[in-house]
Image: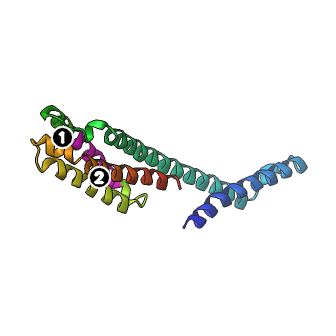
Amino acid sequence: MKKWLWFAIITPIILLILNIIIIKFNFDINKFDFLKTPLFNIFNIGFIIFFTGYFTQYNNKRNKQKKIVEDIILKIIILLENEKMYNINNEEDFLKIRITQRLINNRIDLLQSYSNIFDFSRLYNTSKNEFKKYWEMISEKPNDFNYINSMKISLTNQLSIVISNMESIIKLLHK
């Protein structure tokens, strides 16, 4: 598929350049016959211009979508790397984590629509499930902060898996 797309982009560009050279050469030799250009050449140039513009817009749209996905992922990573995500000492910390958890879940859900477009469904599902496990571990005993602090390593592990998957998605976007 990628070879076809590459061919579909390069071919119109080469044909456009050749047509410009031929038209310029034709104009230099036959200055008065320039306006007698065959209809075929006019259609050829129009065809090339149309498809060149189409593929340029297609690539711009995909690049914008990639930028949106990358921005969402970077925001998720920043939230996940916060020390407060695994260092919960009181009720206030727990409430802040709860708000952050909702925000992260919403951002992960935003990625779902792009997961099929950019083919990172497996990484998306793994991230979602690992973050769900993280939240289940914390919410198992929400008021027992000694228990939560005893699970710091497990919590950090869950978060690092999500971060790793998010970074893998960014890498996949730039292939």
Name the residue: 71% across, 59% down: 39
Q: Residue furthest right?
A: 29
Q: Amino acid at mark 2?
A: Gln
N-terminal-most mark, 2 or 1 = 1
Of 25 and 103, nearer the camera is 103
Q: Position of residue 112 (x, y in %)?
A: 32, 55
Sort mark 1 into few (<14), some (14-19) or many (20+) by Cα contacts within 10 Å: some
- Check the image and report above or below for 7 versus 17: below
Name the residue: 26% across, 51% down: 154
Residue 98 is tagged as: 1
SS of the residue under disc 1: helix
Residue wearing tag 2 = 158
- Check the image and report above or below for 84 versus 15: above
SS of the residue under disc 2: helix
Q: CA distance from mark 2 to mark 1?
A: 16 Å
- Please state which of the two labelled residues, at mark 2 or mark 1, is closer to the viewer: 2
Q: Amino acid at mark 1?
A: Arg
Asked if residue 42 can be seen in this view, the reply is: no
Of 157 and 77, nearer the camera is 157
Q: Is residue 131 left or right of residue 73?
A: left
